[in-house]
Every structure is written in structure tokens, then in C-alpha cells.
Image: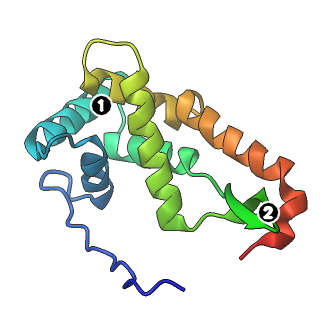
Amino acid sequence: MSRRNIAKKRLISPDPIYNSKLISMLTVRILKNGKKGIAQKIIYEALEIIQKKTESNPLQVLEKAIRNGTPLVEVKARRVGGSTYQVPMEVRAYRGTNLALRWLTKFSVARSGKNMAFKLANEIIDASNESGSTIRKKEETHRMAEANKAFAHYRY
């Protein structure tokens, strides 16, 4: 049994312009070497690009992209009697949002394009339209869970 303290959940302060906690969570994912100002600038530029391309509220597009990219189930490795099983488990809302944000940033970086703001904007637009790498990753996660549902009784 672990004797460590349980990590306390930190309070997320909303971002200064849109007053949104989602944007501040996304800022943390994009953050590199503690340069929060640059990360925020990238996100705000991406939101402006989304505004121009879709002619709708960029915050709603971002929320829809995250909702579309949030997985409902995932697989976790569990050792039972010397062998490891991939056990499907439901994803809590907060973890699902975190996974969606992580995938959005990961696949934005991997995309080809001019700059990070442009790549992030395109990935968010794709995810809100239910296409793109983030949605593919979510579907792959769901397929893995579906394939391993025979091991669901090994849940902790």
C-alpha cells in the first residue's frame, strides 16, 4: 500500500481575455520552458484564425472540439497472475477533458503548417467537425476498449 499523500486538485484560474478555464488548461498543455505569455499568444492567435475561418464564436468551436475528442472509455493495463490484461474502464469527465486537450496539442504539433497558432486552429476546427487526428485517436481508444471488453471483470 502506498504511503504517499493523495495529490490535491489545483484550482484552475480562468484566462484573462475569454475568462475560460478551458483556455487556461490548453495554455498549460502548450506551455514550453515556462513561457506562458507565448503559449497564450499562440492560443489567442489560433482563436482569431478560427473566428475568421468559421465565422462563429471560437470558444464554442473549441468546446465542441473538446467534447468531440473526449473519450468515454479507455484501457488500463492490469497484472493478474503473471499476465497483463488491457482492462476497459470508464473515463471520468475531468480526465476525458485532459486527454482531449493533450491529443489536440500533440496532433497540432505533428501537423504541417506555417506556425503553431495556424496548426492548432486547424486541428480544433477538424475536431469540431468530427475529423482529424484527435477524433481518430478517440475512436482508436474506443476500439481498444471494445476489443478487450472480455476482461472488464478485472476492473479494480
- Label 2 SS: loop
Gap in Å between the C-alphas at discs 1 and 2? 53 Å
Query: Could you say where residue 129 lies in the image, as x and y percent from the top left?
Result: 55, 32
Q: Is residue 32 left or right of residue 136?
A: left
Q: Is residue 71 above or below residue 94?
A: above
The answer to whether residue 54 shows anywhere in this view is no
Image: 133 above or below 105: above
Nearer-N-terminus badge (1/2): 1
Q: Which residue is mark 1?
A: 51
Image-based side of 8 in relation to 35, left or right? right
Would residue 109 be seen by someone viewing this image from the given angle? yes
The residue at the point 57 percent across, 45 percent down is 68
Q: Which residue is mark 2?
A: 82
Which residue is found at the position 83% from the left and 53% from the top? 148
Three-letter amino acid code at the position of disc 2: Gly
Q: Residue at x 20, y 40 (%)?
A: 32
Q: Residues within 10 Å of mark 1 (few under 14, many from 20)?
A: some
